[in-house]
Image (cartoon, helix red, strand yellow):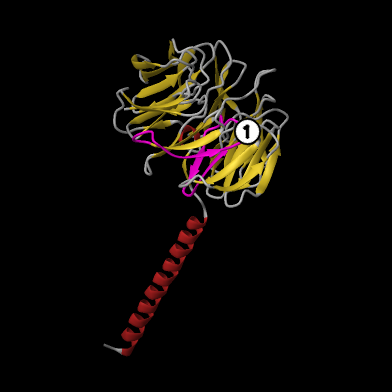
Amino acid sequence: MTGSRKRILTRRVCRDRLFCIVTGLTLLSLAASCSRGDRPVAMFRGGPTHTACDKGPAIHGDLSWKTQLNGWVISSPAVDVRKGVLYIGDSLGKSLYALRVKTGEKIWTSETEGAILASPLVTKNRVMVGSEDGVFYCLDRESGRPLWSLNTGAVINSSAVSDSDRVYFGGWNGSLHALAIQDGTESWAFQTVGRITSSPALDDGKLFFGSWDGNFYCLDSSQGKEIWRFSVSEGGKIGSSPCVDAGRVFFGATDGKIYCLDATTGKQIWLFETGKWVDTSPAVARGSVVAGSTDQNLYCLDKKSGQLKWKQTGLGPMISSPWIYNDLVYAAGERGILAAFKLSDGQKVWEYRMLNPIKSSPVAVGGMLFVGSYDTHVYAFR
């Protein structure tokens, strides 16, 4: 082999080794960066965009277990299927619970000073929730041991959402708070002029939520700066939690309307008018938007046009938000009825009657359906 060829091969080997070293260092850097965060695992409406849909093994409506808590259950379950743990709060018991998904057995209970109506947020290492005592709590998810807390001075019904570094939620003082997951330090706060009971949705670095001041807001999640706002009909309030899907955001209001906005600009794409106020959060899947109203109807709308596909009645006024699983919609209402409807045409497949109203929103994951009731129980179905 000539000297020139040896030099060329030597340069190539060095270059390839350098490439491998740089690539390895980059991957290590990315891994370290990811490990620093505490990624979300389970939360209200299933994920940060609140689409409330999933698929898996069929659910037939057979009661698997029910577990009694210490008060009305308005909080919606947050379910970590991989770990097999469900997290939920209650009212009179003023507590947060961790239950086993398969049996309903209580793993731990953590008491607060106020009712817990919000749904817990579960991350890799923590579980977080706000209480009506005005305190936002962060606990160790394995033991329920308190890690940190922040007193906001106002009732918290808004369920939190998070990225890997910050957690976001609203309060009755009209503030949307952003806290560091690590230690609860407040990163920023955005002030509205009405209560915030809406639970923020997070998509592509933007936060979406409504306020009782009648405005729907879009903020930059990193700094809390307003990007746009949209006003509903005069006198309307927004308690509904939004859902974001494919560049559109969906929510309801007390003016009785379901809105669809462009998530980038805030411009209205369509609206649908029900007979009374809409406080539920829409579920979106397969080109359909499903939401309940206090006019006692469950509506399924075409996602693109907002045209009515079907509606069902019989559940009573609905505060509980629907969930889409496989080809079924699960919904519940004030009459204490939990029911499954076909997403395609609204035909009822099965129902289960409880003794008290259902305000908790059903969650279907991993072949099981979970919901809380005013009768102080958490129910699980297969």
Quarter of the image with the C terminus in it: top left
Residue at x-position 40% and y-position 22%: 330
Q: In this view, does 186 lie above or below 247?
A: below
Q: Nearer the viewer, residue 201 or 261?
A: 201
Question: Which residue appears at 52% of the width and 13% of the height?
Answer: 317
Q: In this view, does 354 lie above or below 76?
A: above
Callout 1 secondary element: loop
The residue carrying mark 1 is 156
Q: Which residue lies furthest to the bottom in this view?
A: 3
Magenta stretch holds residue 169:
no
Left or right: where does residue 141 sit relative to residue 1? right
Q: What stretch is highlighted in magenta?
A: 101-129
Q: How crowded is mark 1: few (under 14 residues within 10 Å), some or many (20 or more)?
A: many
Q: In which quarter of the image is residue 238?
A: top right
* Residue 169 percent location from the top left of the image: 61, 37
Residue 181 on image: x %, y %: 57, 49
Circle count: 1
Q: Pick whichever, 202 or 62, lies toward us.
A: 62
Residue 121 shows in this picture: yes
Residue 265, visible in the rendered structure: no
Tell me the quarter of the image containing the N terminus.
bottom left
| Residue positioned 42% across, 72% down in the render | 21
- Name the foreground residue: 231 vs 38: 38
Residue 178: give x, y in percent of width and height.
63, 43
Residue kind at label 1, given as amino acid type: Ile
Residue 18 at x, y = what percent?
A: 42, 74
